[in-house]
DNA sequence: TATTGTTATACTCTATAACTATA
DNA sequence: TATAGTTATAGAGTATAACAATA
């Protein structure tokens, strides 16, 4: 019956935050070897998975706001990793350049290695359980 | 045998990031009603749980660097939420003021509500499983 | 009018380097 | 010397507001 004051570690939200922070650092390190930040890599990989979508559509998929997409796309374009196509209207769908496609594949490989290194020890069942818990948290049930 | 390009959502690391991001936003909203940012609230709650530790020790517990602790502590001190004691040496252990203790309790309550709202639907077993997966990720096995 | 893309701006968290003061 | 605290500074991600161009 001691007046135990709860530690932050008892909170699942806190556990999630600390785990995510360490995971992001690990991923950032792996991607830095490719000259990519995590957001840049996620854009390349998203575009690889779904070619010819617009930058605002990528932003919607990755939860990056329009205003923040602009400089990211500008940077990737300046590095000749992506190109704008001549779509009709203001949208200008994006595509990976040859160089961009190769880098996207490399980035995807690093992400796979990151996942394997950090979650590979979990059983397939536990991996499925984890996904089933996490996904509704950000998709909103 | 289609050449399916993997989606980011298949990666557990990505799931963790998106979930953590949404959870942090939710928590930040709840704490903002108390005039606290997440880092500030975590410092108050940590100090409530373990009185009279130094600011660098708090930083070690919460993974906040010394250099970043300085302005945080200065801000909380200016708001009369914490006070420095006259410990020997350069350490100057911290303590919550009466006002700080009350706010820490409020913050802790918001954190509990946040956890309940977002993880409360999970069975006790699933909550234990989640903690057992997350904690080693940041403690380093 | 609604959407896209852009610019400007600001806030939060995090990171490194360098300095002072104290044991 | 090792640790604590501080200052300055920078990078990265995220947020809002406002504007122009296009359907």
Image (tube, coloured by chain):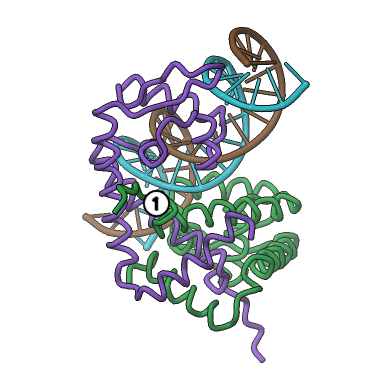
Chain colours: A green, B purple, C brown, D cyan
| Residue drawn at (40%, 49%) of the image | A7
Chain letter of disc 1 in the image? B
Q: Is residue B23 above or below residue B84?
A: below
Query: Which quadrant would the C terminus of chain A be assigned to in this image?
Result: bottom left
Q: Is residue B113 left or right of residue A41?
A: left
| Residue drawn at (35%, 76%) of the image | B123
Q: Is residue B39 left or right of residue B132?
A: left
Q: Is residue B83 above or below residue A6?
A: above
**Residue B14 appears at what percent x and percent y?**
54, 64
**Residue A89 appears at what percent x and percent y?**
44, 60
Q: Is residue A104 visible?
A: no
The residue that disc 1 covers is B24
| Residue drawn at (53%, 78%) of the image | A126
**Residue B68 appears at what percent x and percent y?**
52, 30
Relative to the observer, which residue lies in front, B101 or B76?
Answer: B101
Which residue sits furthest bottom? B1
**Residue A41 appears at what percent x and percent y?**
63, 57
Label 1: element kind: helix
Please identify the quarter of the rendering in which residue A139 is found: bottom left
Q: Is residue A78 visible?
A: yes
Q: Is residue B103 left or right of residue A19?
A: left
């Amino acid at each position: 019956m001691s007046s135990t004051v709860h530690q932050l570690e008892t909170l699942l939200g806190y556990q999630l935050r600390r785990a995510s922070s360490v995971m992001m650092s690990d991923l950032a390190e792996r991607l830095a070897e490719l000259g990519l930040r995590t957001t840049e890599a996620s854009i390349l990989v998203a575009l690889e998975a779904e070619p010819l979508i617009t930058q605002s559509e990528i932003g919607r998929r990755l939860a990056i706001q329009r205003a923040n997409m602009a400089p990211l796309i500008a940077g990737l374009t300046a590095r000749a990793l992506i190109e704008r196509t001549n779509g009709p209207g203001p949208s200008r769908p994006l595509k990976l350049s040859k160089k961009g496609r190769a880098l996207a594949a490399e980035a995807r490989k690093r992400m796979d290695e990151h996942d394997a290194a950090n979650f590979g020890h979990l059983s397939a069942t536990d991996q499925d359980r984890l996904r089933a818990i996490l996904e509704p948290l950000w998709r909103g049930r």
